[in-house]
Image: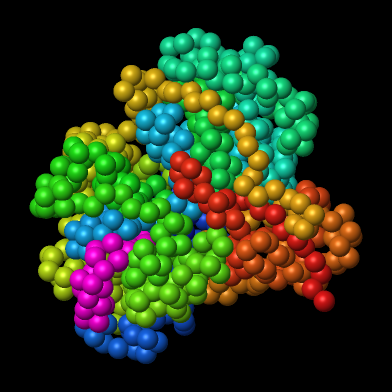
C-alpha cells in the first residue's frame, strides 16, 4: 500500500491508463496492482509525466485578448458574450467541443452544460477523430461499443493475435507485456516497431485494409475454416456475407493490396487453428472514409472463425485517448446522452431529463459531428462562438489550415488549457486549468474498466479545474451545477442507470477498493461485467450480426500531380497534438522535430538524402519536414507523425458516412527536396 506521502493514481496519457504512484517531489513510480501494467511497466511518457505539472509554460491566470485578468473578469466577459450571441442568433450559435482525455465527470458535465445551460445541439468532441468508426461497427455487429469486451490480461493466454493498424510498441508500450505469449500477425503499411516483433507482417497499400479483410474472409470460407456451429448458434446474416465475398478471390486482393496470397493464407490458417485467438483493430484500419466498413470486415472475419463472445478469444478495438471510451459514453458526442443512450430515443430523453430536472423536449436533438462542426464555425449558418475543452484542433483536425481560419472567423473563442497551445493562442479567452494529478475523477480505459485518478498535489495558485469553469459559467447563465467531481459522478451514475453503459452500481469507494470496475454495473452489489458477450450479444435477439461490406478506393487516389501516398501516425516520445509532450525536455530530445519517412528507392528517385528538408504538398496545403530514409516503409508511401503543426495541413477531411470519421490515414501528396 502507498504510504501517506504517496498517492495512487493513473497515467495522464493513453487508454491503457497504467497505474502509477506520485511521491514527494513529484517522483513517479509504477503501480503493480493495476492489471493494465501489473508488471510495473511505464513508457517514457509516463515516467516523465510529473514534468507536466511544473512546466514553465503553464498558464496561471485567465487571458482576455492575450492579457492576464482576474477570474471574475474573464468569466463575466464570457457569460455576457454567450448571452448576447444566443439572444441575437439563437442557442445553436454557440458550440462546445470536448476531448477524449477529459474525465467521465467532465465529459458528462460538458454535455449537460451544452444542452441545459446553453440549449445548443452543437456539441461534439475529438473522439470522432479516434474511435468513432470502431464504435459504429461494433454497435451494429454486437449492439454495444466497448473497446475491449474482455480484460486486457486475457490476451496473454491466446495463441494468435492479429493487430490491424495498431503500432502498440510506440502508442502504448506496456501493452506489449500482454502479447509476449501469442504469435503476432500485424497489418501495417510500415514495418513499425510492433511489426518487427511479429511472426507475420502483412504490408498493404494504404487505404486497402478493407480489401485485405475481405480476402482473408474469402480464404476462410474457401478453405473450410468457418466455425459453422458457432455461426449457426450465435450469429445472423452470414449467408448474405458469404455470397458477397464471391468477387474477393485472393489473387485479386493481392493485386489491390500488394499482400501476397501465401501470407494471407498463413494468417487465416493460424487464426483458425488457434485454441484462442483475437482480432484487434486500431487507427490504421479505422481512420478512413470507409473505416466503419473496414472494421466491420474484420469483425465478420472474427465472427466467421467463432472468436467473439468466447472466453480466451474475441474481437476488440484499441482505444487511443486516455478516456476515449468513457469520453463518448456520457454526452459530449453529438448524438448521445449519458449511459451511451441515443439522443433521438424518446425514452432516453425522458430518463435523462428527469435526472437533469428539465422537460424532455427542451433537450436539443443531435447536432453536427466534429469535423462538420469545426468546418461550420463562423459561417452564416454555423456557430459564432465556441467553448473548447481538452482539444487542440489547429494541430489535430484534418485540413488544419482551413480549421484555423474557421476558428479565426468566430465572434468568440474560449479555451481551457494549461499552456498556450496552438489553438489557445487564437482564443479570445483562455482559462488555465488543472492537470491530471491536481484533481480527482474517473477514467474508463480501453477494456471498459472504470478507474479513479486521485488528486496528489495542489494546482498552482490561480489555476482552477474544468468543472469549476463549467459551474461558474452555468451559474452566470442561471443554472446551478456542482463542481465537486464526486458529486458530479453521483449524478452521472443516476443519468446512466438503465443505459448500455450503466455506471449506477459504481462508486469511488468501489473503484479504489477493487482497482477498477467494469461497466455495465447496474447496482451496488453487481460485480461488474468484464466479458459482456459470453452468454449473448447486446442485440435484440442476442445474436451478433454479420454485415456485408464492399471495398472502395480511398477518397483521394494518387495521380501524376500527387503520386505518393501519405500516412500519418504517432511516435513513441509524443502524444496526440503534442501540447503536453513537446514541452517535456527528455521527450523533445528523443524526437525534437517533425520528419517525413521515405523508402530509399523513392528518396533516390527524388534526389533526397537523410537530413534534407523536404516539401510535402497535397490538394489542401503543404508542409516541410526533415527526411528520414528507411526501408521500413513501402516505396509508394511516406509517413509523417501528427504531433506537430504540418501533417494535418495535408490530410483529407473526407468523412465516413456512418461514423463521420475523417480520412487521416491516406491521401495523395507530392514530395520534393526543398531547394
- Rendering coords of residue 646 (x, y %): 62, 68
- State which quadrant residue 541 falls in: top left
Q: Nearer the viewer, residue 378 or 602?
A: 378
Q: Does the stretch in magenta take in 25?
A: no
Residue 35: image quadrant is top left
Measuring from the top left, give residue 493's x and y in whole percent.
Answer: 20, 46
Whether residue 184 appears in this view of the structure is no
At 40% from the left edge and 70% from the top edge, which residue is drawn?
378
Residue 76 inside the magenta-drawn segment: yes
Residue 545's spot in the image, x, y percent?
44, 23
- From the viewer's perspective, tell me whether residue 137 is left or right of residue 502: right
Q: Is residue 92 left or right of residue 655?
A: left
Q: What stretch of residues is rendered in magenta?
A: 75-100
Judging from the image, the colouring scheme is rainbow
Q: Please tell me whether residue 430 is drawn above or below residue 11 in the rendered image.
A: below
Nearest the eye: 655 or 179: 655
Where is residue 391 shown, x and y percent of the image?
43, 64
Q: Residue at x 59, y 21 (%)?
A: 244
Please tell me which residue is depicted at 16% across the width and 74% down the height of the picture. 476
Residue placed furthest toward the front: 380
The majority secondary structure of the magenta stretch comes to helix
Give me the residue at 68% from left, 24% from top.
248
- Nearer-the-camera pick, 123 or 34: 123
Relative height, residue 634 to residue 620 (above, below): above
Question: In this orientation, does residue 654 appear?
Answer: yes
Of the 4 image quadrants, the one containing the C terminus is bottom right
**In the image, 383: left or right of 81?**
right
Amino acid at each position: 500500500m502507498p504510504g501517506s506521502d504517496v498517492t495512487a493514481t493513473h497515467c495522464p496519457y493513453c487508454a491503457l491508463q497504467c497505474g502509477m504512484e506520485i511521491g514527494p517531489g513529484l517522483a513517479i513510480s509504477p503501480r503493480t496492482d493495476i492489471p493494465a501494467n501489473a508488471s510495473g511497466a511505464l513508457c517514457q511518457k509516463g515516467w516523465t509525466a510529473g514534468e507536466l505539472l511544473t512546466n514553465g509554460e503553464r498558464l496561471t491566470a485567465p487571458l482576455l485578448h492575450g492579457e492576464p485578468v482576474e477570474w471574475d473578469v474573464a468569466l463575466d466577459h464570457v457569460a455576457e458574450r454567450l448571452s448576447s450571441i444566443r439572444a441575437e442568433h439563437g442557442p445553436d450559435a454557440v458550440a462546445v467541443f470536448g476531448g477524449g482525455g477529459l474525465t467521465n465527470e467532465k465529459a458528462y458535465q460538458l454535455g449537460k452544460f451544452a444542452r441545459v445551460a446553453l440549449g445548443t445541439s452543437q456539441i461534439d468532441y475529438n473522439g470522432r477523430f479516434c474511435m468513432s468508426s470502431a464504435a459504429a461497427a461494433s454497435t451494429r455487429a454486437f449492439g454495444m461499443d466497448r473497446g475491449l469486451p474482455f480484460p486486457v490480461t486475457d490476451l496473454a493466454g491466446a495463441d494468435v493475435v492479429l493487430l490491424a493498424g495498431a503500432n502498440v510498441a510506440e502508442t502504448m508500450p506496456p501493452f506489449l507485456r500482454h502479447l509476449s505469449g501469442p504469435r503476432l500477425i500485424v497489418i501495417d503499411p510500415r514495418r513499425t516497431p510492433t511489426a518487427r516483433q511479429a511472426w507475420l507482417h502483412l504490408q498493404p497499400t494504404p487505404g486497402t485494409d478493407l480489401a485485405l479483410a475481405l480476402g482473408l474472409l474469402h480464404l476462410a470460407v474457401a478453405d473450410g475454416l468457418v466455425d459453422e456451429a458457432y455461426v449457426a448458434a450465435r450469429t445472423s446474416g452470414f449467408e448474405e456475407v458469404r455470397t458477397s465475398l464471391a468477387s474477393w478471390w485472393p489473387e485479386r486482393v493481392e493485386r489491390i493490396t500488394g499482400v501476397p496470397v501465401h501470407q494471407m493464407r498463413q494468417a487465416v490458417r493460424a487464426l483458425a487453428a488457434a485454441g484462442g485467438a483475437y482480432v484487434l483493430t486500431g487507427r490504421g484500419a479505422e481512420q478512413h472514409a470507409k473505416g466503419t466498413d473496414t472494421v466491420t470486415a474484420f469483425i465478420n472475419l472474427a465472427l466467421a472463425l467463432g472468436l467473439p463472445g468466447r472466453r480466451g478469444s474475441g474481437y476488440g478495438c484499441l482505444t487511443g485517448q486516455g478516456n476515449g471510451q468513457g469520453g463518448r459514453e456520457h454526452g459530449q458526442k453529438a448524438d448521445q446522452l449519458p449511459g451511451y443512450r441515443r439522443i433521438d430515443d424518446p425514452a432516453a430523453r425522458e430518463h435523462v431529463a428527469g435526472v437533469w430536472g428539465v422537460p424532455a423536449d427542451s433537450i436539443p436533438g443531435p447536432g453536427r459531428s466534429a469535423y462538420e462542426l469545426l468546418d461550420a464555425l463562423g459561417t452564416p449558418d454555423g456557430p459564432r462562438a465556441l467553448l473548447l475543452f481538452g482539444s487542440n484542433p489547429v494541430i489535430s483536425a484534418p485540413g488544419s489550415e482551413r480549421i484555423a481560419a474557421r476558428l479565426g472567423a468566430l465572434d468568440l473563442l474560449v479555451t481551457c488549457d494549461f499552456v498556450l497551445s496552438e489553438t489557445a493562442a487564437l482564443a479570445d479567452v483562455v482559462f488555465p486549468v488543472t492537470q491530471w494529478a491536481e484533481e480527482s475523477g474517473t477514467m474508463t480505459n480501453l477494456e471498459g474498466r472504470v478507474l479513479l485518478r486521485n488528486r496528489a498535489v495542489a494546482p498552482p495558485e490561480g489555476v482552477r479545474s474544468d468543472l469549476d469553469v463549467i459551474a461558474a459559467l452555468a451559474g452566470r447563465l442561471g443554472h446551478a451545477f456542482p463542481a465537486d467531481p464526486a458529486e458530479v459522478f453521483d449524478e452521472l451514475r443516476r443519468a446512466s442507470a438503465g443505459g448500455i453503459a450503466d455506471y449506477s452500481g459504481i462508486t469511488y469507494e468501489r473503484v479504489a477498493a477493487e482497482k477498477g470496475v467494469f461497466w455495465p454495473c447496474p447496482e451496488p452489489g453487481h460485480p461488474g461485467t468484464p466479458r459482456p458477450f459470453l452468454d449473448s450479444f447486446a442485440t435484440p435477439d442476442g445474436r451478433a450480426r454479420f454485415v456485408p461490406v464492399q471495398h472502395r478506393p480511398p477518397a483521394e487516389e494518387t495521380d501524376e500531380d500527387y503520386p505518393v501516398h501519405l500516412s500519418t501516425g504517432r511516435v513513441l516520445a509524443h502524444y496526440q497534438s503534442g501540447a503536453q509532450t513537446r514541452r517535456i525536455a527528455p521527450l523533445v530530445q528523443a524526437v525534437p522535430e517533425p520528419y517525413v519517412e521515405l523508402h530509399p528507392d523513392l528518396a533516390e528517385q527524388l534526389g533526397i538524402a537523410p537530413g534534407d528538408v523536404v516539401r510535402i504538398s497535397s490538394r489542401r496545403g503543404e508542409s516541410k519536414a526533415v527526411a528520414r530514409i528507411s526501408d521500413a516503409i513501402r516505396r509508394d508511401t511516406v509517413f509523417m507523425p501528427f504531433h506537430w503543426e504540418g501533417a494535418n495541413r495535408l490530410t483529407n477531411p473526407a468523412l465516413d458516412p456512418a461514423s463521420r470519421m475523417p480520412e487521416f490515414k491516406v491521401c495523395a501528396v507530392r514530395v520534393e527536396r526543398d531547394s
